[in-house]
Image (cartoon, helix red, strand yellow):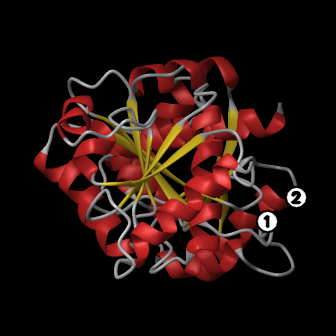
Amino acid sequence: MIKNMDEIIQFAKMRGPKTIAVAVAEDLEVLMAVSKAKNMGIVEAILVGDQDRIENIAKEKDINLLGIEIINEKDRTQASLKAVELVSTGKAHIVMKGLVDTAIILKAVLNAEIGLRTGNVLSHVAVFQVPNYDRLIFVTDAAMNIAPDVKTKKQIIENAVKVAHALDINIPKVAVVCAKEKVNPKMKATVDAKELEEMNKNEEIKGCMVGGPFALDNAVSKEAAKHKGIDHPVAGEADILLVPNIEAGNVLYKAMVFFSNTKNAGVIVGAKAPVVLTSRADSDETKLNSIALAVLMAAKKEN
């Protein structure tokens, strides 16, 4: 069971390298992260984008691109399509967003001819290393699905469970997080939570343990769960936090990033291959962690 970001990096070294195709690669933090990952033996890399700009950034910031292939494509839409095509044709295992709008790279990922669509829901899984916690905390979905219904939430859970399995967490505990820990017919998220728990009991959702509804405190704190009299195997021990909607997920994600000393990584799941889709505001360290997480996902898929 992988418990922190250092172990994610360590195991990515052991299970890699995998080849990453970067769409519109002329971005300083992306180039720094990819170069580090290459030097650490985590990835081989193919950079698709404006070759002159890529090489100028690398020269100016002393980034080592030795052994990294560059495909010159100045048009951002075409560069995104090319990066995705490298994955769909088996020349790469992971696609990564560079200096391009999220909508453009996702359109390429979902392209009917050369894309990576599976028919499943795409969702974002964030992984946090929280100080003083003995485990990683997964948050989903903070980026993709605006107001998922219960069927979509089922697939979001399944996507997150795949990430947890790639980190050797064999039976991850999933807390369906709501505003309160009791079912209230006026609060649909609580009704969905109980339905998802029943799906798990009926083995419609496999490979994990699902509980809910939980408020955030009694999902992650045994003491809080005890005070509320909640006796459930997931209570206080959640690995995966399923949020009710994108607003809750986005606020929780950014609060953890900016208000606490966390380390994090993120990946888009549900396509044929992992998609590293980080924010411009993310550091090169977060991008490196995300690459390593995607390498573990790709290695798990191969096995």
Is residue 260 visible in this depiction of the protein? Answer: yes
In the picture shown, does residue 85 fall above or below 160?
below
Q: Position of residue 182 (x, y in %)?
A: 33, 60
The N terminus is located in which quarter?
Answer: top right
Task: Evaluate whether residue 41 shows in this view.
Answer: no
Residue 235 falls in image quadrant: top left
Q: Nearer the viewer, residue 119 or 245?
A: 245
Q: CB under 8 Å between callouts 2 and 1?
A: yes
Tell me if 188 is positioned left or right of 210 in this view: left
Q: Nearer the viewer, residue 13 or 231?
A: 231
In the shown orientation, is residue 171 left or right of residue 183? right
Q: Estimate how packed mark 1 is, as few (under 14), some (14 to 19) or many (20 or more) residues with alpha carbons within 10 Å.
A: many
Residue drawn at 39 percent across, 24 percent down: 4
Q: Dot 2: within a 10 Å radius of its alpha carbon, few (fewer than 14), some, or many (20 or more) residues?
A: few
Question: Closest to the observer: 124 or 288?
Answer: 124
Q: Which mark is residue 85?
A: 1
Task: Answer with the quarter of the image where residue 224 lies.
Answer: top left
Amino acid beneath label 1: Glu
* Relative height, residue 9 to residue 227 (above, below): above
* Disc 1 secondary structure class: helix
Q: Residue 166: where, in percent of width, then height?
A: 64, 33
Q: Name the residue that disc number 2 marks.
A: 89
Q: Residue 38: x percent and y percent?
A: 56, 32
Callout 2 secondary element = loop
Tell whether 100 sits left or right of 89. Answer: left
Name the residue at 58% across, 27% down.
169
Distance between mark 2 and mark 1 Cα atoms: 6 Å
Identify which residue, 131 or 280, lies in the foreground: 131
Position of the C terminus by quadrant: top right
Number of numbered callouts drawn:
2
Amino acid type of the residue tagged 2 in the rendering = Thr
